[in-house]
Image: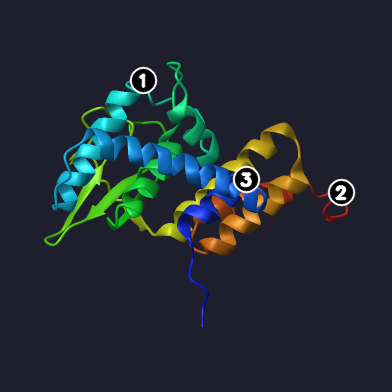
Amino acid sequence: MEKKFHFEKEALLASGVNGKDELAIYENRLHIILQRFLSENLQVPDPVRKARDLFNWLEKEKPARYEPHGQFRLSDVIDAQLSKDNQAVGNCLGLTLLYNCLLKRMGIDADALYLDNAFRMGPHVLTILKTEESSIDIENILPDGFEYKGHLNNQSRTRWEDKELVADIYHSLGNEYFGKGEFTKTLKNYNMAIKLNPQYEKARLNKAILMDKTRDNKGKVI
């Protein structure tokens, strides 16, 4: 029997959180964020209304929350959300991870949507909320992004479940290490991304580029 994938825990582990004590710290910080929201908002049974209220509350708490090349690790995003300054919270991946974790803690079923290119900025992720009738796109980088319609005709729309979204953390880490020239760590993270999402063509392409770059004149990987 396949072991159940624990989205929140796996996202924290992928983000570099190590050990039970540190995991417990960040799980508690997520709890604090959610409890603050619940204490300030009237609780309603409708999951779409709950999701909208949470989205609006997060925007109110941190109006300048999006940064194009900002934080993508869930742990960093949690810390930024709780900070008292006006720093940005994260990039599209980081904001989607945080929002989806909070939704799942409220028992609301949400996945992610991957686009090859959005806003002319390249690859992009956002939340997609399942409803009884269909689904709702939730664009976490925009203050009015709840029920966003701008991606409906994007031909590259790919629905990601929890494993695929966590895979994007590893892929982003791989890209970060590649930029630093730390190719062993780059390969490790690309491999993790592909393991969790075998259909992730961007990760496969970047791994191929890495392998080509690190081959010596005899064709051996350095």
Residue denoted by label 1: 64
The amino acid sitting under disc 1 is: Ala
Q: Residue 153: in sight, yes or no?
A: no
The amino acid sitting under disc 2 is: Asn
Q: CA distance from mark 2 to mark 1?
A: 49 Å
Residue denoted by label 3: 22
The amino acid sitting under disc 3 is: Glu
Q: Position of residue 54 (x, y in %)?
A: 26, 39
> Within the image, what quadrant is residue 142 found in?
top left
Q: Determine the residue positioned at 60% across, 51% down.
A: 13
Q: Position of residue 178 (x, y in %)?
A: 68, 39
Q: How many marks?
A: 3
Secondary structure found at label 3: helix
Q: Position of residue 166 (x, y in %)?
A: 50, 53
Q: Determine the residue positioned at 53% across, 64% down.
A: 198
Residue denoted by label 2: 217
Instruction: Please state which of the two labelled residues, at mark 3 or mark 1, is closer to the viewer.
Output: 3
Q: CA distance from mark 3 to mark 1?
A: 28 Å
- Few, some or many C-alpha atoms within 10 Å of disc 3 (few <14, some 14-19, many ≥20)? some
Residue at the farthest bottom position = 1
In the depicted structure, whether residue 57 falls above or below residue 43: above
The one of 34 and 122 positioned closer to us in this rendering: 34
- Few, some or many C-alpha atoms within 10 Å of disc 1 (few <14, some 14-19, many ≥20)? some
Q: Position of residue 96 (x, y in %)?
A: 38, 42
